[in-house]
Image: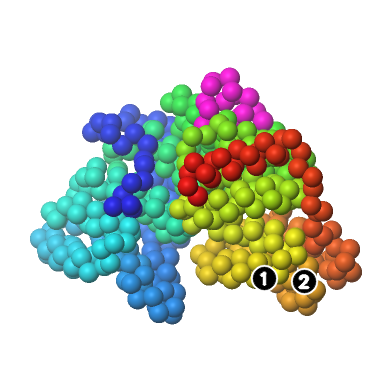
Amino acid sequence: MQGLTLVWWDLGRDTSCTPAPVTTTEGRALYTPQRLFGEVGSSSDILTHEPFLERARLQREQERDSSARLALGAYIVARLLDRLLSFQTDEHSAEGFRWQLESVRRHIDELPPTEPETAHLAGIVDAIPAEGPPPSATLWKSLTAYAYFLENEARFEESLEVLSLAVRAQGVSLTPMDFVSYALLAGRLNRRLARWEPATSCYQAALDGASSIGDQQRALRARLGHAHVDRALGNLPRARAEVEKVLAEAVKAELVDVQSDAHLDLGVILMLQGARTESLEATYNAFRLTDDPHNRMRILGDLGYGLNESGYYDAARLALEIVAKSSVIYLIKVNAILELMQLESAVGNRVAFERRRQGAKQYSSRMTPSMLVDYHYKTAIGLARFGQVDRALERGQEALRLAEHHQLNEWYFRVERMLDGLRRDSASASEIEAPAEADATPAVIQMETGLREYASLAAI
């Protein structure tokens, strides 16, 4: 089924041998679940699996019974795994575990069979041994695939919970390479939740682990993760310097995928620094360097953003509509819809702006902190452009509150500038004024031609 096609690094290799202990220079264990997720069972870090219950509650309120039962299914599977990983060997406990397993299995059997999440949950339950530990390799691989599925659905807190279970289930068979891959994913999830300290800690764990086994590709990805955090916290010069170093090393090592990621990151930083032409070139280089369909959509979203910000509206609309119409994951699709909101308000198409705004609103309960700030920010800009200044101020204040709450410094200052401009004079607010439609340069014409060919070949 669709939900079982996610990929995990090196799943086919033999992990039956326990790796030799590796420590840092301070003598701390390098490859442990505790380094990524804290001590399970402590008062501050014990897994409660509340994100699943919260999803179930929200789905119930929206009268989406099937979705609520899926969330509840994920919760009871997680509780069952907690029991497996703290298994008591006495007969009474073992009998209780078997009873709980059968109860969970009955619930999963009643879930909608066509849902990808059902397939994930069923695969996990099938891999749980009725006799108790040790967990099988199939179990932690299934959990890891489920964590990726939840990430692609923008359910980042849930993904972190499942990822922690996967690492614990793998236990003594956790290899250094697996640890690094887990650490990179944990860093990315924490970053998307605007949890900067845990994200930095996980990226450092990934860098330490990758460096210890000589894995240059993953080490460079960990350094890009650090640069992501710097960028989000507003330190653009340090982020740019690190990305440029990573790019140079990736070129030297002929690591094409890392080159593409670094070009993409550099494009975002350059745009934030006001170097729009260089940003577009860097982002287009990222697009040319990748063959992965998922990454292409992700990059097209960023390219559409850059073209929109530069006033190349026709090319921007083409790139963004390719993404919005594709079967790409939720996160990338919604970002494209948000950018189309901005574009339609820039060209003065109020009907299209409202249509895009309503399309984005239906996803608001699942948006990441930065996406939610962006949604309110772009709504405020659009309302102001159409003369609804009071409503724009209200939406801008909400964006500012969220940015402050989640310590999104770069966003905070940007929203604050927009609000200050609106209060002074809406007509002269620099954050509100859309760039005049620009004449396409030869480079932009080449991009647009290439995108039309791509859309035609992909039947989008």
Which range of residues does the magenta coloring cover?
244-257
Mark earlier in primary sequence (1, 2): 1
Picture residue at 76% right of the left edge, 42% below the top: 440
Magenta includes 312?
Answer: no
Q: Which amino acid does label 2 sit on?
A: Phe
x and y percent of residue 58 in the render?
A: 44, 74
Q: Which colour scheme is used?
A: rainbow
Contact between marks 1 and 2 (CB within 8 A): the answer is no
Picture residue at 55% right of the left edge, 59% below the top: 334
3D distance between C-alphas at marks 1 and 2 = 11 Å
x and y percent of residue 346 in the render?
A: 75, 60
Asked whether the viewer can see residue 429, the reply is yes
Please tell me which residue lies in front, 32 or 391.
Answer: 391
Instruction: Classify mark 2: helix, strand or loop.
Output: loop
Tell me the quarter of the picture where residue 375 sits. Answer: bottom right
x and y percent of residue 203 in the render?
A: 53, 41
Q: What residue type is labelled 1?
A: Val
Please tell me which residue lies in front, 50 or 349.
Answer: 349
Q: Mark 2 points at which residue?
A: 386
Q: Is residue 150 left or right of residue 430?
A: left
Picture residue at 67% right of the left edge, 47% below the top: 315
Vertical position of residue 397 compared to residue 297: above or below: below
The numbered dot on residue 351 is: 1
Q: Is residue 156 left or right of residue 93?
A: right
Vertical position of residue 337 compared to residue 246: above or below: below
